[in-house]
Image (cartoon, rainbow, N blue to C red):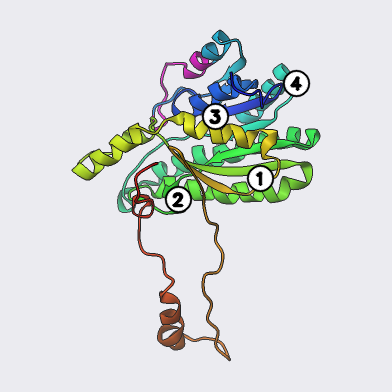
Amino acid sequence: MPTQTLNGKTVLVTGAGGGIGRAIALMAAEHGANVVVNDIGASLSGASESTDAAAAVVNEIKAAGGQAMASRANVADAKATQDMVDDAIAKFGRLDAIVNNAGILRDGFFHKMTPEDFEAVIRVHLMGSFNVSRAAAEQFRKQNSGSCVHMTSTSGLIGNLAQANYSAAKLGIVGLSKSIALDMQRFGVRSNCIAPFAWSRMTSSIKVDSAEQEVRVAKLKEMKGEKVAALAIYLASDAAAGVSGQIFASRNNEIMLMGQSRPLRTVHRDGGWNTETIAEHGMPALQASFYPLEVSADVLSWDPV
């Protein structure tokens, strides 16, 4: 029986009908939380589907003796997210943590990406994270406590091919999380990011068109959402009281603290710079510290532990 680290607390998890979100919702309930299971019941691309994945997870939680409620609110809709938060507070009396996990994919190389596909992914990932966090902010302020856990990705932190919309949204979430952490710290509110590695509906869309990709997908299939869930539950709990404004990655048995932008190298010149001196002196001096054009797999090149 897990330690009841969330006993009496209420946790809202978006995109919780399957994969990592489902694992987080189930683990939150195991740790004693009342759980709001949010899932719109859509396909990976965001198209509407008839299945009610949220209700299925709620039934699992209740069958195990836990407390939960389902929500099919669209996180891209600010009013719907506010209604969802209000309903959670009305039912459970409080809200202690949110996990912004909902997302869609509309991958494509940048020169082929449509404005509609770019906007759709930004709307669900980035606007969805803002909407849910903003809806919860007033309750967190009143309680003088609260935790925001946001799912980012190494696609944004490092880079990936054919994911300009997803990468932009996920890196935007990092900036959002840091701003929440700074603005809300006086109210006892924390905000952190997780870049998850696990086999889920999102990663199942990876194209397998080479032996290297087959090996990569096989490794991903070994990584379970429960490993990510453990970190999310910790960050939602009072045990993480001193942890805010951080970016973590969770990959099987590894937890990584990811870097944040700071100056790497500086150059200066009396009298300032012009285009010629930048070309002759400034850029060559900085170039040794340039980042190469790498994707996530190039940087995290070792096998998952």
Residue 260: give x, y in percent of width and height: 55, 57
Pointer 3 local density, CA inside 10 Å: few below 14, some 14–19, many at least 20: many
Which disc, if any, is residue 243?
1
Give the residue at mark 3.
Answer: 14
**Labels 3 and 1: the sequence-earlier one:** 3
Q: Give the Cα separation between the discs numbered 2 and 4.
A: 36 Å
Which disc, if any, is residue 285?
none
Give the residue at mark 2.
Answer: 156
**The residue stretch that appears in magenta:** 44-57
Q: Using the rendered image of the protein, determine whether residue 151 is visible from the camera's viewpoint.
A: yes
**Labels 4 and 1: the sequence-earlier one:** 4
Residue 199 counted in the magenta span = no
| Vertical position of residue 36 compared to residue 98: above or below | above
Q: Amino acid at mark 2?
A: Gly
Which disc, if any, is residue 93?
4
Q: Quadrant of the C terminus?
A: top left
**Labels 2 and 4: the sequence-earlier one:** 4
Check if mark 3's residue and mark 4's residue have beta carbons within 8 Å.
no
**Labels 3 and 4: the sequence-earlier one:** 3
